[in-house]
Amino acid sequence: MLEDLDKDIREHIEAETLENIERGMSPEEARSPALRKFGNVTRVKEETREVWTFLWLELLREDVRFSFRMMRKSPSVTAIAVGTVALAIGANAVVFSVLNATILRPLDVPHPESLYTIEHWRDKSLALSYPDYLDLRDHNHSFDGLAAYNGTQAGLDTSGHPARAFVDEVTGDYFDVFGIQPHLGRFIHASDEHGPNSAPYIVLNYAYWHNHFQDDRGVIGRTVQLNKHPFTIVGVAPPGFHGPVLFFIQDFFVPIVNQEQVEGQNSLSKSRSA
């Protein structure tokens, strides 16, 4: 709108200048009286902008009044319309959050561009079985390392008051693959795994350590109850690390070989097709 106003002013001044030239003035002389006849260009712009603003506000006021009149006549339709808009905004927000977490924002780890996920070739699923993982790990010739994880929930008791927590069950090479260092203590390693329920260790998420243990550095070596099984806290992950899925924040990590104690069942021997 303002661009159109500038164009109209230029055309008006140019037309007046041409008329002055036709009256016998030189091009240099003709422009000055054309500008004087038009008046203060800046003032004209400001006054025109004020008029447009007033008209826009007046039209908006009339549109709002008309909308409210229609709402009074048909409130159910209005509720549906408002609900539809709200759902659309909410859906867009969720989609952006997921895209931002999974695509737009890189993982806070060294060399995130070198990380890849492996999917099942038949249905493009990322859900692979533990035997699949072992087979890929043992016959891998393409990657520096392979790791697997599984998200679940469990009850953690630190002081006689068990609470539900989000857990990532991870393989022994999980932290090594990401190339990160613990904030405190140590990580879980492949050398800790010696069969089912052989590694009752916990690595706390940094935020969980901060919020539930008040940054107590003495938690390393402390024994807690995870679903009534004793587990030892061996480390705290660095700030900002949440694994490969940024919109899911787990409270801590445990070895996947201890799945039976964490979930009450052991499905590690089952193949994906079973």
Image: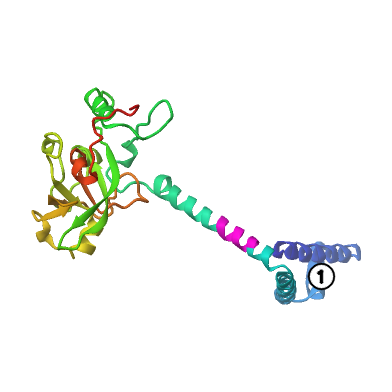
| Residue 213 visible in the displayed image | yes
Closer-to-camera residue (48/17):
48
Instruction: Give the quarter of the figure containing the C terminus.
Output: top left
Closer-to-camera residue (6/157):
157
Identify the secondary structure beneath mark 1.
helix
Amino acid on which disc 1 is placed: Ala
Q: Where does residue 215 sit, x and y in percent of width and height?
A: 17, 63
The quadrant holding residue 83 is bottom right
* Residue ID at (34%, 35%): 116
Q: How many marks?
A: 1
Question: Within 10 Å of the Cα at label 1, are there few (<14), some (14-19), or many (20+) other Cα atoms?
Answer: some
Q: Where does residue 213 sit, x and y in percent of width and height?
A: 18, 63
User: Which residue was labeled with disc 1?
Assistant: 34
* Residue ID at (26%, 35%): 267
Q: Main secondary structure of the magenta part?
A: helix
Closer-to-camera residue (106/82):
82
- Magenta-drawn segment: 80-88
Q: Where does residue 125 sit, x and y in percent of width and height?
A: 40, 33
| Residue 44 visible in the displayed image | no
Q: Where does residue 161 sit, x and y in percent of width and height?
A: 19, 63
